[in-house]
Image (tube, rainbow, N blue to C red):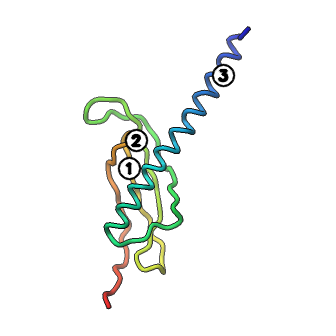
Amino acid sequence: MFSLVNLSCLVLVGLGALYWWQSGLFKGRARQLAMEHCRQLDLQLLDQSMVITGFWPIRNSSGNLVFRRTYQFEFSSTGDRRYRGELILEGMALKSIDLEAYKIPESE
C-alpha cells in the first residue's frame, strides 16, 4: 500500500522525468533554429551545443501560460574566433535570436 510520502516521491520523480524529457525536445528545437539562422547568415554554429540560461513561466500573446526558455550558443564567422548568440523560445515558438557583433569575412 502506498503511503502519502511514497506517493509524493513518485509524483516528484515523475515530474522530474517529464521535465528532463521535455527539456530535450526544447533544446533540440532551439538547436535547429540556431543552425537555420546561422546557415542563412553564412555562419558556423560551433559545438552544436545549446546552454539554457533562463527558464520562467509567462503568458504568451494569446494569454496562455507557457515557459520562456533562454539558450546561449556559440558561432563563428571566419573560423578564427568564437562569438555568442542568444535564442529565446516561448513554448515552442521562437521569440528572438540575438547575435554578438561579429567580423564579416572579406570577399575574395
Amino acid, disc 1:
Ile
Picture disc at residue 88: 1
58, above or below 9, in the image: below
* Residue 10: numbered disc: 3
Left or right side of 94 for 9 = right
Q: Residues within 10 Å of mark 2 (few under 14, many from 20)?
A: many
State the CA–CA distance, disc 3 to disc 1: 32 Å
Q: Position of residue 41 (x, y in %)?
A: 32, 69
Q: Residues within 10 Å of mark 1 (few under 14, many from 20)?
A: many
Residue that lies at the very extreme toward the bottom in this rendered image: 108
Query: Residue at the location (55% across, 32% down)?
Result: 18
* Quadrant, the N terminus: top right
Q: Earlier in the sequence, mark 3 or mark 2?
A: 3
Q: Amino acid at mark 2?
A: Arg
Q: Residue at x 48, y 44 (%)?
A: 25
Q: Quadrant of the C terminus?
A: bottom left
- The residue under label 2 is 68
Of callouts 2 and 1, the N-terminal one: 2
| Image: 80 above or below 14 | below
